[in-house]
Amino acid sequence: MHSISEFGKSLRTPRFVKPGARTPYWADGICLAILTLFIGLFIYGLGQMMHPLAVLNSSPMSLDPARLPEYALRTTLRMFIALAASLIFTFVVATLAAKSRKAEQVIIPALDILQSVPVLGFLTFTVTFFMGLFPGRQMGVECAAIFAIFTSQAWNLAFSFYQSLRTVPSDLNEVSRQFGLSAVLRFTRLELPFAIPGLVWNMMMSMSGGWFFVVACEAISVGDTTVNLPGIGSWLALAIEQKNLAAIAWAVGAMALVILAYDQLLFRPIVAWADKFRFEQTASSKRPRSWMYSVLGRSRVAPMLGSILAAPWKCLMLIDWRVFSRLWKVKLTPGVVRVLDYAWLGLVMAACLAGSVYLFRFIEASLGVSDMVTAFGLGLATMVRVIVLIVIASLIWVPVGIWIGLRPVWAERLQPIAQFMAAFPANVLFPFAVIAIVGLHLNPDIWLSPLMVLGTQWYILFNVIAGASALPTDLREAATMFNMRGWQWWRRVALPGVFPYYITGALTASGGSWNASIVAEAVSWGDQHLEAAGLGSYIANATQAGDFPRVALGIVVMSVFVIAFNRLLWRPLYGFAERRLSLV
Amino acid sequence: MMAVETRCLVDVQKVRHVYGKGSKERLVLDDVTLTLNENEIVGLLGRSGSGKSTLLRSIAGLVVPTEGEVNFPRRVQGRAMSVGMVFQSFALFPWLTVLENVEVGLEAQRVPAAVRRKRALAAIDLIGLDGFESAYPKELSGGMRQRVGMARALVIDPDVLLMDEPFSALDVLTAETLRTDLLDMWSEGRMPIKSILMVTHNIAEAVLMCDRILLFSSNPGRVISEIKVDLPQPRNRQDPIFRALVEEIYVLMTQDNDAGEIRQGVFPGTGLGMVLPQVSTNALAGLIEAIHAPPYSLKADLPELAAALHYNADELFPIAEVLQLLRFAELKGGDIRLLPAANRYALADVDERKQLFAQHLLSFVPLVAHIRRVLDDRPTHTAPARRFRDQLEDFMSESDAMQTLNAVIQWGRYAELFAYDELTDQFSLDNPS
């Protein structure tokens, strides 16, 4: 990638540069300090990961606040390693899907399903797999945890990138073909930049999703194996076990600090930088700002760093790729192509069939029809919860969101807070709910349910805020002119105006809620265990007991529910919103 | 006697191009042959759908024609590119600065960075973009953006500059400045190029800039005539010879329909399979009123009318032709003349207008009559639009079918011949009253 000033104005000095705009040494100082800190922490954390598993057992977790920074660091490191892995996965898989029709036929449906499958349920299988891969080393468990986070981050990134690749504007496409850009140059100059705004947004979403999982997957117990990886998640698990409220408060504080730090130091600058990749020909009046980005822009370190990062790409660009494309030129007749297509399709279908048969056998070997009926019934219970909660959350947050969105000053202030709330892993707050439910003798079947939307309701809120702020002024003025108020105003102006945004938010919220049910339907506080009857607690219990067939059955049933939900409800609503209510 | 040797740069032989497959296939270029020689500006002039952009793209190597050949007789061995292209939509990379945008083509040729910079700056200088090197496209006006597009095409040192309606996305004043600047650079030999091939649908623009104009018919695109423009540069739009030439081209462009009786074939396809343009009923009414009123009083000269209404030929023709299809007007020799029905229309009130329009729609647009008949025959008086769309797709491409049906929906709604519900995608007879 090119950096902020890769094309340094060395050749001629721009005439309008204010003297001293690039001189302050303090900017360099800040940049260097932050950079050194990052690298140091990274190396330290990585070193910790390599220790053998025995070290972990000999020095167990403690709830000493002095250890908290280290735990926070290791958790964060896992998150970013998973994010990096997700990005690599995205570039490879999504590019493959966009360039090859055969790959596309497999990858896109697979991504679609993976995106809506409860990834928490996979933990059981992946932990076993990775611990087998690195026997006796911490690395195995680390990998399992990282993989769990990865499975919560990768799919939407890949989807976004694929979508961008498919919608590259045709005129830019023609320009790059006319100039004969090589594949690498095309990627760096056209495809990647075009995809960046979508990627950045999805990266932030992925990070938020990832927190939820990191908390759930650091303290892993599968059957009789229990591993506590040093991190905030394990800290929290221990605090819950010891009923230590103060420790939970510490964890909440640490988490908030970490989220704030990477938001300010990493994501804000990236968003500010990504603004120039937005594909529109008019300059927008409101540009995202970031103090960190301004500091980077003023320092001399950033361009250096940029050119270091860009160096590998430059090397790739120097290679004459056309040599390879010439080697590839094998012309196939249409007949052969068709036969190959059918063969490929047959292969894929056969593989899918074999997979389902294998899965069915695996479940059927120890479970009967009655188990499936049970799982299905519990799925219905969880579905009722999800629907009721989304309705309640909508009833609360849609009016609030519209109210906020129509007041720009408030929207500007509250939007980041809503985003922060969405990023905050709600499962950290579960213990408080348990204390309340136990203390007040409430029915867990009902009162555990709100936990499912605790973290996901914010998607509804901030999407509605965005929708309401995007409502054109002339529409609002017309409504005022005609003296529209009360229900008529809501029905004719506000609700249709925010509907497309609301659907996006509600879709994300409902998907997240299904996933959250696995941790929200079975919670504990010390020796007290609360459970709500539902598919989530079914999977959680099966995981605890190491009952693989039941875990598999639970996941399959939940996937079926989620996919049916998406296909039968959200997708049609989405289409309706696109066709009828979009303002563009 | 020494004959000035005209050296051929681009040689297009018998190019034929078909889009789509099977029953939906559409012939866009039919047997087109042209040569582009050194030191000339050649314009490809025609209506939309005449395949001129497709031809330009075949020369640029972006489209491989179904039949025929595109040759570059003077292409030097080893030099990959000899054409540069300027796009109607500018097609700049919004995330690259002006300088980076200009450098992209050189980067693709793996020109060393220092040389690249030097050549890009030279091109930017030439095209008058000095001082904008570090600006992003979104900070520039349309005219400046197209200058970047031109610099980018010129910097790779092409023999031929291809331009696809380069000025049609610009406002009138900006477009004129850019044309003049380009002509100045051309006549002073400051550009590295040896000739220019441009696509346009603006007749005056073609006469102003080109040495030779190739006139294309539409559906399918064929070269119907070649006009040499011998006027010295700079040309004056008010010059009577200039105006006569524009007039002559207008006549040639309407001549298609000059076979005595009015034929249906203005639009591709016949009967139900006719591809109809989306022309709003307001535009139709507006044109009738404009021609009905003085100074024209029932008969108008098309170029004059276009100028008075601030329309391009390309925008005016479809409206005029729908009027002709509906027997409200006839086009002959660059003139449009209102028929008695249009006279009545102009004088009628809203309801009478609608009735008149409905009568003509039913009589002269087979698809409208067909839809109405189906609705009348059915006991429920409803029919899914899908049914008609499928039927149309037997004759034409999916997008043409969609466009045609949308046009008919609009006209039918105005004439109150039938109603259409977008949500259910259904035609019906019940008009809310």
Image: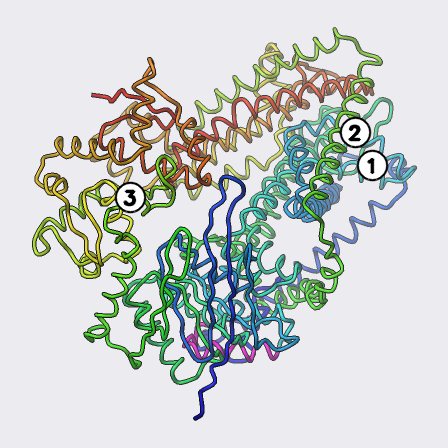
Q: Which amino acid type corresponds to the residue marked 3 in the rendered image?
A: Val
Q: Are marks 3 and 1 in contact (CB under 8 Å)?
A: no
Rendered image quadrant of residue B382: top left
Q: Residue at x 63, y 57 (%)?
A: A187
Q: In this rendered view, identify the residue nearer to me: B8 or A124.
A: B8
What residue is disc 3 on? B279
Q: In what quadrant of the picture does the C terminus of chain B appear?
A: top left
> Element type at marker 3?
loop
What residue is disc 2 on? A220
Q: From mark 3 to mark 2, how far is it between C-alphas?
A: 66 Å
Q: Are marks 2 and 1 in contact (CB under 8 Å)?
A: yes
> Element type at marker 2?
strand
Tell me which secondary structure the magenta stretch mostly adopts. helix
Highlighted range, magenta: B114-132
Does residue A464 appear to the left or right of A72 in the view shown?
left
- Mark 1, chain letter? A
Q: Residue at x 44, y 87 (%)?
A: B4
- Mark 3, chain letter? B
Q: In this rendered view, identify the residue nearer to me: A581 or A294.
A: A581
Which of marks 1 and 2 precedes in the sequence?
Answer: 1
Are labels 2 and 1 on one chain?
yes
Taking the magenta stretch, the answer to whether it contains residue A258 is no
| x, y percent for residue B288 | 16, 46
Are labels 3 and 2 on one chain?
no
What residue is disc 1 on? A141
Whether residue B274 is situated above or below residue A330 in the rendered picture = above
| x, y percent for residue B83 | 53, 70
